[in-house]
Amino acid sequence: MGDRRAQDAKENGPHLALTAPNPAEQVECSSIPNGDSGSALTTSLYKKRWAIVFLFSSYSLSNAYQWIQYGIISNIIVKFYTVEAFAVDWLSMIYMLTYIPFIFPVTWLLDKKGLRVTALVANALNCAGTWIKVASAKPELFWVTMVGQLLSSLAQVFILGMPARLASVWFGADEVSTACSIGVFGNQMGIAIGFLVPPILVPNVDDMTELAYHIRIMFYISAGVATFIFVLVIIVFQERPELPPTQAQAQARSIQPDEYSYMASIFRLLRNKPFMLLVVSYGLNVGCFYAISTLLNRMIIEHYPGEEVNAGRIGLTIVIAGMAGSLICGIWLDKTKTYKQTTLVVYVLSLVGMLVYAFTLNLGHLWVVFVTAGVLGFFMTGYLPLGFEFAVELTYPESEGTSSGLLNCSAQIFGIIFTISQGKIIDKWGTLAGNIFLCIFLLIGTVMTGKILTSAPHVFLSVNLTASEHLNKSLFFSVNTSVTVWDVSKQSHEYH
């Protein structure tokens, strides 16, 4: 982003460059006297900030775990509830579906009501969902478990937009990236645990009474953890520190948020052709990841019957490798700033990884599946931060929160389409055909990424904003939205 601002100053004069100051630079100037008052605003860092971010990470983990807890034992859930595999797939896809219509209203609510109200609503929904599932551990109550999962999926929408806001409100300039990383790490660990634990807790037994007991135990553990975290949130979670952590926060507390229009920003982004190409190509890649995660159990069990536990471990391998890929790709971008080139290379390698995974899945050697799934996860999940950072480059000076919201919406839409389509293809023609189906769309996404033009799109956007809008937006988003998504994206993906 610093490169973009320097280019603005050179091409358009200092006025345009100053209209969109870097929030990180504002924070670093916290010890410099205020030009109007002659003295710096008082700031302070509180030890409680670490308790807040770890508490957030904990309830994010609890919620992300529930996304995949059914899918990774889908054959057992199908047998227990006597439903179609497609119905079980919807227990995962409901997370994607609810995100699409609710993300922007929830973002607005976060800005209007703040962190504590959002956290309380998220945990109330998450906790209610887990207890409803406890009551659903009977073969005839599949609809009840779906209701519980619906509430948990709604909680997810209140969780995904919080890390950047929480970090900017509570942490100093040199801690924001770390705080965001901790928040996002909880989501990733939840998915990893969701792959690993359910196959251990729920063995594939034929006795329905025993199976109901194991499923109920799984639900009770989820509900107990969610309830404990909810109580902690009620007691500990605070809206904001008494004194702001940075000069940017101190100034932003006096800014009226009504001066910035979400809809105007969205319409500007929709007219940005390079960004819209990225929105589609990003959705294709991440949608493939969602489909693979949801259908992993079905693919593994088809070729390796009785290996439910190893299916979970393979999912864990994908997530852990993906976390390493995200970190390495983020560091590489920090060093090189080669956004399009790196994004394109990783996209191509994701396609290669998918092809290798598709053609080696049926070889009969589980260790090969572990290796190929790890390689696939490394590049496919490693692409996630690249997509977000590339979007920031293409859409500057628009809000990173708005652009990331559009990217995530695309991912959810394609995730639903690919999960349904691949599931049907697997049922009719097998796993190879289903995986080739995903490869075709990864190839389309690769071509679209290659066609993205990166010639100063920020100039196109800048002319649509007045100088006062730039300044107001910069101050407003330093506290009220995801201005630090730039830092989050270096560490992890869209939050599911």
Image (tube, rainbow, N blue to C red):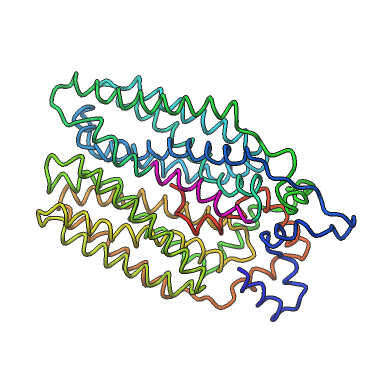
Residue lying farthest to the right in this orientation: 37
Numbered-mark total: 0
Q: Which residue is more in the foreground, 176 or 119?
A: 176
Q: Which residue is at the front of the view, 293 or 459?
A: 293
Locate the N terminus and report the quarter of the image it occupies. Answer: bottom right
Q: Residue furthest front?
A: 47
Q: Is residue 24 above or below residue 86?
A: below
Image coordinates of residue 170 in percent, x first then y, are 65, 44
40 or 19: nearer the eye?
Answer: 40
Is residue 185 covered in magenta? Answer: yes
Q: Nearer the viewer, residue 193 or 94?
A: 193
The residue most toward the left is: 364
Residue segment shown in magenta? 174-190
Vertically, is 307 above or below 25? Answer: above
Does residue 144 appear to the left or right of 209 in the view shown? right
Q: Residue at x 53, y 24 (%)?
A: 231
Establish if 81 lies above or below 25: above
User: What residue is at 58 percent from the left and 42 percent from the top?
Assistant: 105
**Would residue 390 be counted in the magenta stretch?**
no
Residue 283 in picture, x, y percent from top left: 41, 58
In-image side of 197 versus 230 (left or right): left
Q: Could you tell me residue 465's position as x and y percent?
A: 71, 65
Q: Is residue 434 left or right of residue 465?
A: left
Q: Residue visible at 26% across and 46% down?
A: 295
Instruction: Tell me the chief SS of the magenta region.
Output: helix
Q: Position of residue 165 (x, y in %)?
A: 61, 47
